[in-house]
Amino acid sequence: MVKSGRYSHVLPIKTMFQGSFKYSVDNKGRVSLPAKLRKYVSLEANDTFIILPGVAECINVYPLDEWQKFLDTLKRLSQFDPQQAYFKRKMLDHAFEEKLDGQARLTIPQLLLQKAKIDKEILIIGQLERIELWNPKLYEEYDSRFTESFADIAKSVMHGS
């Protein structure tokens, strides 16, 4: 929430993580959350995040309130459909809850750092309701897999919008 100029009423800020930032991971697996992202963490999240492997070779970080919204989607998946059950299981089996410490750092579980091949350098990317953590070299490789121009991809993806 922010105050609107000279007015005393408070306006809600929607979660809208965007931008990319290169940071370092310390030897305890802690990474600072950039202030430009931190300002969009809602009061409802209570500085609590759910950290889990991403579908790509990254780590997803959801503020608790956004994770609750995502869980509503997962709850609608059928436990009797093998593909849906597997997807739900994989999304939840390595999900960790962590709080920001007093220096606005998140501790990333070693298991997740290893899976994402993140050592010392980390690329933090805002993805609207969540944040992605990448090994910068793996992100470059991921990015280079797309041979179409960005304009062609944008046309294909956004044609109905």
Image (cartoon, rainbow, N blue to C red):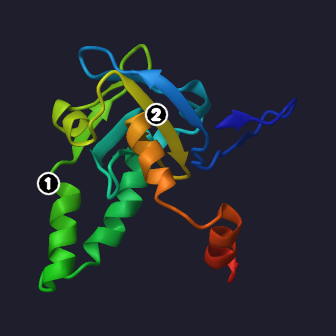
Question: Residue 72: which quarter of the image?
Answer: bottom left
Q: Nearer the viewer, mark 1 or mark 2?
A: 2
Q: Residue at x 32, y 58 (%)?
A: 55
Say what secondary structure mark 2 lies in: strand
Look at the picture and state if 77 lies above or below 139. below
Question: Residue 138: which quarter of the image?
Answer: top left
* Residue to which mark 1 is pinned: 93
- Please name the amino acid that badge 1 sits on: Asp
- Please name the amino acid that badge 2 sits on: Leu
Task: Decide: few, some or many residues near mark 1? Use Cα within 10 Å; few <14, some 14-19, many ≥20.
Answer: few
148 lies left or right of 70 = right
136 lies left or right of 77 = right
Along the polypeptide, which appears first: circle 1 or circle 2? 1
Q: Residue at x 43, y 52 (%)?
A: 142
The x, y position of residue 128, in whole percent, is 56, 52
Say what secondary structure mark 1 lies in: loop
Q: Residue at x 30, y 42 (%)?
A: 51
Task: Decide: few, some or many residues near mark 2? Use Cα within 10 Å; few <14, some 14-19, many ≥20.
Answer: some
Measured in 3D between alpha carbons, the distance from the residue under mark 1 to the one under mark 2, in whole angstroms, is 24 Å
The x, y position of residue 68, in whole percent, is 36, 56
Outermost residue on the right side: it is 6
Look at the picture and state if 79 lies above or below 87. below
Q: Examine the rendering and report whether any part of residue 105 can be seen.
A: no
Q: Residue at x 58, y 25 (%)?
A: 35
Residue 123 numbered tag: 2
Q: Quadrant of the C terminus?
A: bottom right
- In the image, 18 versus 67, the foreground residue is 18
